[in-house]
Amino acid sequence: MSPHRNGNFSVMPLQEFMLEGFEGGPQTQALLFTLFLALYMVAILGNLTMIMVITLDARLHSPMYFFLKNLSFLDLCYSSVIYPKALANFLSSSKVITFAGCATQFFFFSLLATSETLLLAVMAFDRFVAICSPLHYPISMRPSVCARLVLGSYCGGCLNSILQTSFTFSLPFCSSNHIDHFLCDVPPLLKLACADTTINELVMFGLCGLIIVGTTLVVLTSYGYITGTILRMHSGGGRHKLFSTCGSHMTAVSLFYGTLFVMYAQPGAVGSMEQGKVVSVFYTLVIPMLNPLIYSLRNKDVQDALWRLGQRHTAT
């Protein structure tokens, strides 16, 4: 396809993009590489450990830990969609990613991040049923229902990802192919478009706003009922255990939803690339690293399972 003109811009079918990443000379890039590699390795090891412990310990074969294992899987996957390429770019001068590679990275990143947003709401609903309707819990959250809820989270993520990817990568891009980011994401890509991006921004804000607001309402409603139920309990030990378990989930929800809202669900997101890079690091790397720590440090069942697994390994 030959290039054609659109206003003052030369529009051509791009074959590749340049991920500019973070500014700085070789020493800064080497320092960032070391820092990001350390965080990424902690995230990988932490989430793999959570998956392994929940899988191997029969006492953790319950709906709550089934959802937690899927959360660790999502954290593991969407960090791995981004950071191998980002780490390689720290040590490379070209920092090239193909058009197809960029679209593929964004598709899976959007799918996994959206699925995690929905899964966190499912986990809040699970706690609501377990605490507020304990007698109905074994039936309401039987294995087939849990599997459908997780599958629904993935399907919702896939639908959002298809829409976002098709709207974004159908745009005509100007001759400049430099993405002011370390990953392929909607806000920096819209900066390169030659066409009017109003519809794309509305789609992004609309879909992301709907997902974030909808899931936040589910979480707040669930924990509103949970708090009322816990406060009516007479056992201080029971209240402490439930608040500890629910507190872990609320910490994870607050961190993840807060950063997503800053990045995608308010109009200033598209106009602040430097802020966007920092926020992106937080929810694509720091939060996946923190989640295993949040759920293990504040969860005695997970701590006991880790101890039993360690004892079993020592015995062998």
Image (cartoon, helix red, strand yellow):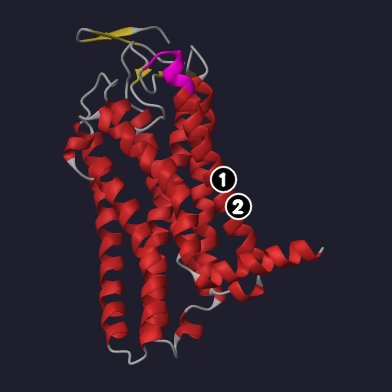
Q: Quadrant of residue 126?
A: bottom left
Q: Secondary structure at mark 2?
A: helix
Q: Quadrant of residue 1?
A: top left
Does 29 appear in magenta?
yes
Split into 4 quadrants, where in the image is the C terminus? Answer: bottom right
Q: Which mark is residue 83?
A: none
Magenta segment = 24-30
**Is residue 160 visible to us here?**
yes
Mark 2 belongs to which amino acid? Leu
Does 170 appear in magenta?
no
Give the spatial CA distance, label 1 vs label 2: 6 Å
Q: Secondary structure at mark 1?
A: helix
Which residue is located at x 44 percent, y 46 percent?
111
Towards the viewer: 14 or 272: 272
Q: Which mark is residue 44?
A: 1
Which residue is located at x 22 percent, y 36 percent?
269
From the top left corner, tell me how far across and down residue 170 is, in percent.
36, 28
Tell me if label 1 and label 2 are in contact, CB under 8 Å: yes
Which residue is located at x 20 percent, y 7 percent?
8
**Is residue 17 visible to us here?**
no
From the top left corner, tell me how far across and down residue 213 is, in percent.
24, 57
Mark 1 belongs to which amino acid? Ile
Instruction: Write down the residue under mark 2.
Output: 48
Residue 222, placed above or below residue 100: below
Outermost residue, right direction?
316
Towards the viewer: 192 or 233: 233
| Label 2 neighbour load within 10 Å: few <14, some 14-19, many 20+ | some
Q: How many marks?
A: 2
| Label 1 neighbour load within 10 Å: few <14, some 14-19, many 20+ | many
From the top left corner, tell me how far across and down residue 32 is, in percent.
45, 26
